[in-house]
Image: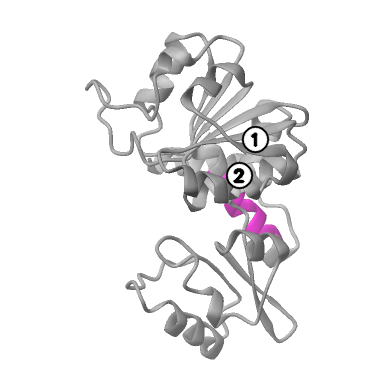
Amino acid sequence: MVAFEVPAGHAPAAISAARTLGISGLMVTMPHKAEVIDALDDLTESARELGAVNSIYWSGEQLVGHNTDGEGLVRSLQLDRGYQVIGQRCAVIGAGGAARSVVHALAQGEASEVVVVNRTPERAEIAATLAGSRGRVGSPADIAEVDLVVNATSVGMGASADAVDPTPFDPGLLHPDQVVVDLVYQPLETPLLRAARRMGATAVDGLGMLVHQAALTIERWTGQEPDIEAMAAAARRSL
């Protein structure tokens, strides 16, 4: 695999280049996840519902856009932590692209409830609809009532190890019966995760989702399961 730096606004040109060069598949990062859609031939159901693509593969002569972000989180919890989302009450903090993919995947994984907490209620409503009847808009108070909390905001990104940095909500809402996931993976130990551990909750960093969403893409490209442990170890060394 190689990395191509594509300036904002140039995603369609990059897709055209991939066609010309016969590139076998692409992973897509921000800010291109929505912009690439019009340049593709088809979308999977998840990519269509989310309006975002992070994985592109060939199906015959067609380039197809897919989204593995949320599924990567659910799979990482299941395989790395032995945690099943089935029947769990969940809160997702944020309503951006990452949050929407998580909301969708939690509902697909049969969580009993997916509460979206966001500063802008209108955006929270859009995200919550992706969970169908399982989704609703909530408030920070709901965080204390759920089993799984997922921070899908960028709060805590780039935080230093010893400084007092902001958290996306009051950590005093957390308790020992909860699992708290922070999708931020740089640093791996965010202020929220430090606070979650102090409150007795199980803290999970964002590396698992990063690794498993990539593994799902590699499986689709090659038809083979990659070595998750090797991928995780390499990513952790890099970080």
Farthest residue, direction bottom = 20
Residue 232 pos. (x, y %)? 54, 40
How busy is the neighbourhood of tag 1: few (under 14 within 10 Å), some, or many (20 plus)? many
Farthest residue, direction front = 122
Residue 168 pos. (x, y %)? 38, 30
Contact between labelled residues 1 and 2, with CB atoms less than 8 Å apart: yes
Identify the amino acid type marked 1: Val
The answer to whether residue 6 shows anywhere in this view is yes
Which residue sits at x=50%, y=87%? 16
- Residue 9 part of the magenta segment: no
Residue 152 pos. (x, y %)? 47, 40
Is 178 located above or below residue 53 in the figure?
above
How busy is the neighbourhood of tag 2: few (under 14 within 10 Å), some, or many (20 plus)? many
The answer to whether residue 72 shows anywhere in this view is no
Between residues 156 and 96, which one lies in front from this camera angle? 96
Q: Please identify the dominant SS of the magenta region.
A: helix
Question: Is 3 on the left-hand or right-hand side of 56?
Answer: left
> Helix, strand, or loop for circle 2?
helix
Which residue sits at x=56%, y=51%? 126
Is 188 located above or below residue 141 in the figure?
below
What mark, if any, has residue 114 been given in the picture? Answer: 1
Which residue sits at x=50%, y=15%? 174
Magenta highlight range: 210-219
Between residues 70 and 72, which one lies in front from this camera angle? 70
Question: Is 27 on the left-hand or right-hand side of 215?
Answer: left
Q: Quadrant of residue 119?
A: top left
Q: Which residue is mark 2?
A: 128
- Residue 217 part of the magenta segment: yes
